[in-house]
Image: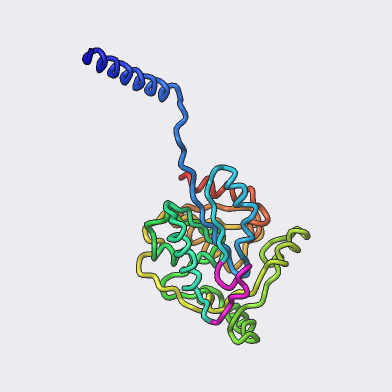
Amino acid sequence: MKQLFFGKITVWFVFIIVLDWQGAWAGKPTSVKHPVYVLVHGAWHGGWCWQQVSAQLRATGATVYTPTLSGMGEHQHTLTPAINLDTHITDIVNLLVMEDLHDVVLVGHSYAGAVITGVADRIPERLRQLVFLDAVLVENGQSLLDVHPKDIQAAFAAAAAPSRGLSLPIRPSASFGVNDVALSRWADARLTPQPYRCFSQPIVLRNPYGNGLPTSYIACTQPALSVLKVFAERTKHNPNWSYYELATGHDAMLSQPAETAALLQRISQR
């Protein structure tokens, strides 16, 4: 009886394995690991600017975070002279740690190119790749001001003077290539002053740029911001970078959210 009992168990065990094997070869669905995105906004903006892009990425099954940096957006009431580039880098590092995020596609728009560069330098093990959306590229020891022409540096310093160096006044969304009247009005209502020390503080990198992570650059070309053309050209002809273009203005996540989301999805799959 004992031999018969164990014999039946063996037969059923083999039968289950065969069914599972047949199901796999018959195209049985397997679990798919969806990307995790952290989308970091640029100067004067907030997490709000990613609403349409994040909705489209989530519709594909992705997990998406759109944090607002200290002193900006809904956190504008917390703006103090202590907020600088390091503060914003720490904002994103803390998000990754507290949410226990891994294998992250980290996207930085405009000014946030400096932010995600600092994050990669500190905590690369939690990241899959870096995506610079029409962003500035700052090397070790450089500040955001350093990578701008002298006349723009002087203009920024003069603009920050009335607040005693606390912040840069709001720039209208039209200057970022947002031409739709209704969309521009919506964005202008949400733009907030930019903490000035985020532009004046040099970045400190302890590792090579990108810290060994795959890096992609997306240039917004219609119209292209003149100050960013140098970064687009640098990455376009560098074999260590993947280069892409979007035929829209600087704020692609507002003017072309569907195309921006589709391109981010494509980049995340490479």
Reply yes or no: does residue 228 show up in magenta: no
Q: Residue at x 42, y 75 (%)?
A: 141
Question: Percent from the top left, x then y, of residue 150?
Answer: 56, 80
Q: Residue 189's spot in the image, x, y percent?
A: 72, 67
Q: Report which quarter residue 163 is drawn in.
A: bottom right
Q: Nearer the viewer, residue 90 or 158?
A: 90
Residue 240 can be seen, yes or no: no
Classify the position of the N terminus by image quarter. Answer: top left
Image position of 225 (left or right of 7): right
Q: Would residue 24 be visible to someone looking at this image? A: yes
In the rendered view, would you say 185 is above or below 144? above
Relative image position of residue 103 (x, y in whole percent):
42, 51
Is residue 146 positioned above or below 232 on the image? below
Q: Residue reaching furthest front? A: 1
Pick the residue in front: 117 or 234.
117
Magenta residues, as a range?
A: 69-81
